[in-house]
Amino acid sequence: MKILSAWIKDPSLEGHLSPPLLAVEVDEPPGVTIPPEDFAGGWKVGKYGPFVSYEQEGAKPSAGDFNVRFRGRFPVVVDILLLTPEFEYDCYSIPLSRARQLIRKHDPRWRLLISDREGEQGRITWIPVETDSPCRYWLPEKKTTCGAKPSRLIRVRSIDLPMCAQHVEIHNQAYAERRTSRAS
């Protein structure tokens, strides 16, 4: 198995409110390096080349949950989207140091930062953040984002989106109208 490419997949560029995710393209599915092992709390962890796969019985944990549960035992990981010529896998993660190397090499406009919001909930989650990101306000009539210089980050359904002053104002007005209509 060989890593061919990596990039940050940002769903906000397509009008979807989801956090950006590191996509890693490989030539074939990774083989088992260390078979999945059972751990307390219903966790199962295995290694597949440079990738880690984990699951928890009865839950859908994130890399943040994994990083807290296995701190000191395993390296800190970042969830990824793994792409092969035939399939997409969303069940893998990659150690933080390797994720940073891939981003520096293949998509240097981005970097990985620890999420304050996830930290408030007790998770240690690293998220892709674009340096000098343009306004991500979705323009449905043009089927694209604004692209202007942002003035600040606005939290929309748990996703921090950079927005220009004009779209911050539009967002704030719409939010105030929704809040007023709910109070009535």
Image (cartoon, rainbow, N blue to C red):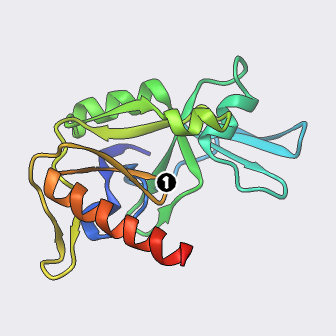
Dividing the picture into quarters, in which one does residue 178 lie? bottom left
Name the residue beneath numbered marker 1.
Answer: 158
Task: Tell me if residue 49 comes above or below residue 84 in the rendering.
Answer: above
Residue at 27% x, 69% y is: 14
Please say whether residue 156 is visible from this viewpoint.
yes
Q: Is residue 172 left or right of residue 79?
A: left
Q: Return the residue found at the far top.
A: 72
Residue 174 in picture, x, y percent from top left: 33, 69
Quadrant where the C terminus is found in the figure: bottom right
Q: Return the residue found at the far bottom.
A: 141
Dividing the picture into quarters, in which one does residue 138 lie? bottom left
Q: Nearer the viewer, residue 175 or 43?
A: 175
Residue 158 in picture, x, y percent from top left: 49, 54
Residue 114 in picture, x, y percent from top left: 47, 30
Residue at 59% x, 31% y is: 124
Q: Nearer the viewer, residue 121 or 68?
A: 121
